[in-house]
Image: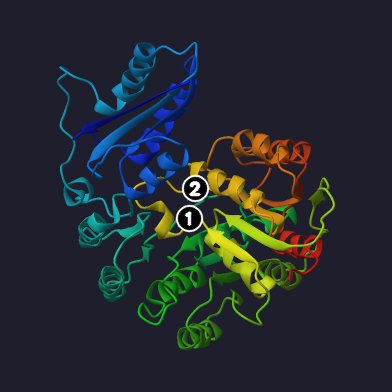
Amino acid sequence: MTDHVELRPGAYADSVTLLQVSRDVQGTPGVLTAQVAMATPLNLEVLEGLGFDVPEASPNDMVVALRLGEDGDLDQALAAVDRALAPARGPSGAREEQPPRTTAAALAGRPGLALVSVPGPSALVEAMDALDAGCDVMVFSDHVPLEQEVALKRVAAERQLLVMGPDCGTAVVGGVGLGFANTTRPGPVGIVAASGTGCQQLLALLDHAGVGVGSALGVGGRDLSAEVGGLATLEALRRLDADDEVDLIVLVSKPPADEVAARVEEYAAGLATPVEMALLGPGRPDLTAAAERVLARLGSDVPTWPVEGSTREGSGGLVRGLFVGGTLCSEAGLIAGGEGHTFVDFGDDDYTEGRAHPMIDPTLRLEHLRRAAADPETGVLLLDVVLGHGAEPDPAAGLAPVLADLDVPVVVSVVGTGLDPQDRPRQVSALVAAGAEVHLSNASATRRALEIGGGGR
């Protein structure tokens, strides 16, 4: 077995491109492991965890790390790296019409919705350009400073424009899914979501119950904080209230600031369209209970939420929750209520600087998964798999082989629908075959994990 590590100073490609490059090179005969990434501190930590000896590097360097088997050929592997990177460099020698060089130039005279997905520190300028052009903005970028979010939303509020985000990963606008949105049927429900995976949990549960969603407006996880004050939430509620196709609005959020929640609830009470609150927090109902209240208000039956497969017997111990969905992680922590259990959100900013979101790149969670399973205090592993456009094309393909090798019980919530590109039934079948117990409801999965773990210590 041979390791090869090299730095390419000044070379750059975005994290999603480099993830695909790594996967392409991984398929080269004789290559056991391939990691091509920008040399951010987090990526270097992952490489060290994989056993690579990486020289001193800066985030401006691209690092190519290859592990070859006895039949591996380094020249062929490096040629595969260059071939995989070539599309990212773009065509050479061809004369093409130059695209607009600024957001403002691209949007001139075309008000609508602009989706901003650039590194967080650069998002303010692009989003403000879009507002100046009269557009609503969906800011997919994370790592946007809080004061910049407040500035953007104050400008938008003055103009009755909507800023979705920052870190807005899910939206359905005009029937079109943006970000990590699931494919569901259209229907009478409109969602305002200060929570991406919370929105996806509702989409999945309502779809399973046969109820469609016409619009889902993400507003960013900080919108109901004291600093932002729900500026985008109020605008999103106003718009859905004016939409004749919406019969019921659902507001879903991670735990909000109490004073902001009270102000938003007062505003919602004055709307013509009824609003169902799904605000997570101590003593508040979970998202599955919120979905059941929505169904009751619409006069629809509450189905039995599906549970498929069965995991091995537990012998007690702590629940280790490893999540890609921040709201799903928060919900699990609220249900567990401490007692030594731990819940990690790998989509948090601390884990995504310089690398793709774990719903796109599972590498970091898989590494932690093996470590958590080897911890003698671990009684049961609790995971989420979130499907939808933009997410991994086949998450079970990477996760199931790892789960099959573990000696601890595993409970998984698979959040998605049969219409999603990943095909939920196919994903569930692969995970069940690997020995996992699979739920549609994250709250149900969490309670089952606590039951297997015997309530912890």
Nearer the N terminus, badge 1 or badge 2?
1
Q: Nearer the viewer, residue 251 or 161?
A: 251
Residue 43 in the image: state x and y as whole percent. Answer: 38, 44
Residue 230 in the image: state x and y as whole percent. Answer: 41, 77
Q: Is residue 183 visible?
A: no
Amino acid type of the residue that numbered disc 2 sits on in the rendered structure: Pro
Q: Quadrant of the C terminus?
A: bottom right
Task: Locate residue 241 relative to residue 80 in the image: left or right.
Answer: right
Task: Locate residue 400 relative to residue 262 in the image: left or right.
Answer: right
Amino acid type of the residue that numbered disc 1 sits on in the rendered structure: Gly
Quadrant position of residue 252 = bottom right
Quadrant position of residue 286 = bottom right
Question: In percent of the image, x 55 and y 57: which residue is there?
Answer: 325
Q: Residues within 10 Å of mark 2 (few under 14, many from 20)?
A: many
Q: Secondary structure at mark 1?
A: loop
Question: In percent of the image, x 72 and y 54: which residue is there?
Answer: 440
Residue 197 in the image: state x and y as whole percent. Answer: 55, 58
> CB under 8 Å between callouts 1 and 2?
yes
Alpha-carbon distance for marks 1 and 2? 6 Å
Q: Residues within 10 Å of mark 1 (few under 14, many from 20)?
A: many
Q: Is residue 334 above or below residue 101?
A: below
Q: Which mark is residue 52?
A: none
Q: Which mark is residue 347?
A: 1
Q: Which residue is mark 2?
A: 358
Q: Is residue 69 above or below residue 314?
A: above
Question: In percent of the image, x 65 and y 56: which residue is there?
Answer: 212
Q: Nearer the viewer, residue 24 or 338?
A: 338
Residue 109 in the image: state x and y as whole percent. Answer: 21, 51
